[in-house]
Amino acid sequence: MPTFVYASKCDGCGKCVDICPSDIMHLTHSMFNGRKAYNIEPNYCWECYSCVKECPQHAIDIRGYADFAPLDHKLTVLRDQEKLEIHWKIKYRDSSKNQFSFPIRTTKWGTIKAPQSYDQPQPEDLHSQLLSHEPQYLKNARGLATLT
Ligand code: SF4
Ligand code: SF4
């Protein structure tokens, strides 16, 4: 299910608009309600959850994927800015509950190097099967496995 915004919770901050890779979260202006976000084209929603995780007001609802939450469940996604974690809570149709947390990112803030900080690629790299910075950043110093 594409995203759905609860207008009563939305404060119009625009964070979902900035992060949506499909560019379908937009803001509307109303004399009575002020700035509110809404999904202008639900058919083009990737269901990537980026806006759900980013919204500080927890104003965006979405259905969980069927592989972890069968139909007729309620999914709540909370962003913990202190712990830098996303907390997921699922209430299943039989009323049982499950919750789990994942880190927002696995590298420390400020530790990602800019592209220009890396060595320049060499022309012969075009003939290598390795992707950029493999195997160093796969943390596999012995190199990739080979068939024998
Ligand atoms: Fe955009 Fe992803 Fe949110 Fe869909 S789930 S509205 S694609 S950010
Ligand atoms: Fe509204 Fe949340 Fe989007 Fe901010 S991120 S505009 S509060 S729906």
Image (spheres, helix red, strand yellow):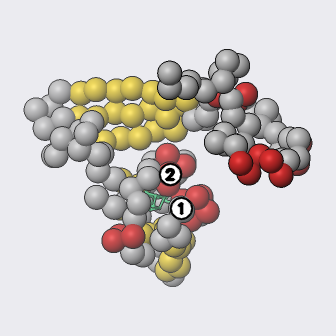
- Determine the residue positioned at 82% across, 39% down: 113
Give the residue furthest to the front. 148
Residue 119 in the image: x percent, y percent?
88, 41
Q: Is mark 1 within 8 Å of ligand 1?
A: yes
* Amino acid under disc 1: Cys
Give the residue furthest to the top. 142
Give the residue furthest to the left. 94
- Determine the residue positioned at 55% across, 29% down: 103
Tell me whether circle 2 and circle 1 mark residues in contact (CB < 8 Å).
yes
In the displayed structure, 141 sits above or below 88; it is: above
3D distance between C-alphas at marks 2 and 1: 7 Å
Residue 114 image-quadrant placement: top right
Residue 53 in the image: x percent, y percent?
49, 46
- Determine the residue positioned at 25% across, 39% down: 67
Left or right placement of residue 82 versus residue 87 in this view: right
- Determine the residue positioned at 69% across, 34% down: 134
Q: Is mark 2 within 8 Å of ligand 1?
A: yes
Q: Residues within 10 Å of mark 2 (few under 14, many from 20)?
A: some
Label of residue 20 in the image = 1
Dot placed on the residue nearer the N-terminal end, 2 or 1: 1
Label of residue 50 in the image = 2
Label 2 sits on a secondary structure element that is helix
Residue 132 seen in render: yes
* Amino acid under disc 2: Ser
Residue 100 in the image: x percent, y percent?
39, 26
Label of residue 96 in the image = none
Ligand 1 falls in quadrant: bottom left
Label 1 sits on a secondary structure element that is loop
In the displayed structure, 2 sits above or below 72; it is: below
Q: Name the image quarter holding the N terminus.
A: bottom left
